[in-house]
Image (cartoon, rainbow, N blue to C red):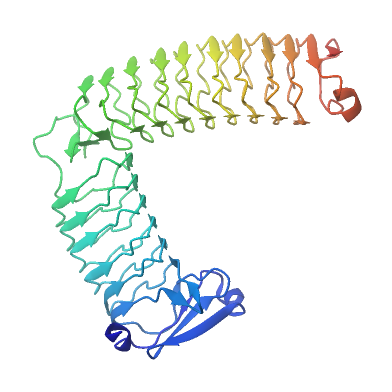
Amino acid sequence: MKVRKSITSFFLVCCCMAGAFDSQAESEMIDGVTWKFDKKTTGVVVTMGPCRGKIAIPAVLGGLSVTKIGMQAFKECTELTAVMMPDSITEIGLEAFAGCRGLKEITIGRSVTNIWWGAFCGCSELSEVMIPDAVMTIDGAAFRGCRELMKVVLGKNVKAIGDEAFSDCRKLTELTIPDSVESIASHAFDGCPLFDTKSDPGFRVLAGWVFRREDDLYLPTSVNLAGFRGIADGAFSTSSELEEVTLPDRIKKIGDDTFNNCWSLKDISIPNCVKEIGNSAFLRCSRLKKVTIPDSVLSIGKCAFDGCSALKSVSIGNNVTNLGWRAFANCGDLETLTIPDSVTAIGEEAFSGCSRLTFAILGKNVTTIGENAFSDCSGLLSVTIPDSVTELEDEAFARCRGLKSVTIGTMVRRIGRGVFVGCDNLERLSVPASFKETGILDNVRLPPECQIIYR
């Protein structure tokens, strides 16, 4: 190809440590250009010589498909002006082209699924980007500081746009966000002239998505987001006066930190189109009393409702599979709990500190109860571990001082350290007869008065 003939020789190596990689590296010359690649995984990662002008990355090296442009592969190649990628590439690694200040044109391969952190950060001459349909993730700072960038076309399957992905793109005026997008980080488009200047004083709007204000001078008490497409992460974080919210009827994810520390929020209705509740989404919403999680929700993130101390009632939808770390920790007023059969894992500290929880039904498909999952639930009176559970992790029920009766299912193969430590009033522990032979209870600390019943 003419493009390849014009390239000054350079090398590409895989993203292992240089010394370790060299022993596994092979090289191949194509049209006068020498390329170095990994024998095992074929990744295009670090240039070893000068690269300038237009380049076309080979689709095949040593008879193997080239699948990745790895970390800092072309970083600070300031004389590079154009890059053509083959369709074999599936990932563009961290800072792969960061600081290529002369880069004006990129052709991203049609098989790329992920553009990782800072991949094109500081490519200040880049004016237009076409993101192919295969791309699902545009990571943080991917195009940050591309100050000549005027137009971005996002492929129809992009799901997530990371923090500062397009921040400081001061000339970016053409952008369409496809319906596939489920989450946008809070500062993804900071410094871009894209926001609707006539939007509500309580927030900013970009292509139907709601973003946080740039200042905290106006704190709304009520927000109606009906008709909007989605909410960016952290959009209403620390809006301490906010009491009620109507969520968009097309929202797919309540993102990370969206309503965290909204201390006055009393009521929230989650529409039946939400698939995910993000990390710390309602962290410390201390006046929230009731939550109904619809069947559309598949996962509840870390600290999603942590510190919602007034929360008395939670209805978890029948399709949730995972309850993240501290998902409902310190919900001090929560009294009863039913975990649906769809849940397979109860995360670490998921309900830790729910001191008034007296009654909990665990779904029949839970396999793991995480470390400290129910620790310090001092009001819990009894619990039945279903037959699906194979592991009780360390201190899963530690310091449940009101706990009197526990029944452990037949499939438990491991009981961690201190599972019932501090359960001073435990009177009855019912376990399978097989526990006698396996000695699974040998290291389990129980109160002296506790009766073990083998069934």
- Viewer-nearest residue: 385 or 72: 385
- In the image: residue 33, left or right of residue 209: right
The answer to whether 98 is drawn above or below residue 252 in the figure is below
Placement of the N terminus among the 4 image quadrants: bottom left
Q: Which residue is drawn at 37% across and 26% down?
A: 261
Q: Please identify the quarter of the rendering in which residue 396 is found.
A: top right
- In the image: residue 187, left or right of residue 17: left
- Viewer-nearest residue: 223 or 318: 318
- In the image: residue 404, left or right of residue 50: right
Q: Residue furthest toward the right?
A: 437
Q: Residue furthest toward the left?
A: 198
Q: Can residue 65 be seen in this view?
A: yes
Q: Residue furthest toward the bottom?
A: 32
Q: Position of residue 151 (x, y in %)?
A: 16, 57
Q: Please identify the quarter of the rendering in which residue 129 is found.
A: bottom left
Q: Residue furthest toward the front?
A: 63
* Count of numbered circles in the view: 0
- Viewer-nearest residue: 276 or 240: 276
Q: Position of residue 327 (x, y in %)?
A: 50, 27
Q: Position of residue 130 (x, y in %)?
A: 24, 59
The answer to whether 455 is drawn above or below residue 17 in the figure is above
The answer to whether 40 is drawn above or below residue 339 in the figure is below
Placement of the C terminus among the 4 image quadrants: top right
Q: Please identify the quarter of the rendering in which residue 373 is found.
A: top right
- Viewer-nearest residue: 131 or 169: 131
The answer to whether 111 is drawn above or below residue 14 in the figure is above
Q: Position of residue 311 (x, y in %)?
A: 45, 14
Q: Which residue is drawn at 48% across and 85% down?
A: 28
Q: Residue at x 45, y 30 (%)?
A: 298
Q: Which residue is drawn at 62% across and 20% down?
A: 364
Q: Is residue 265 visible?
A: no
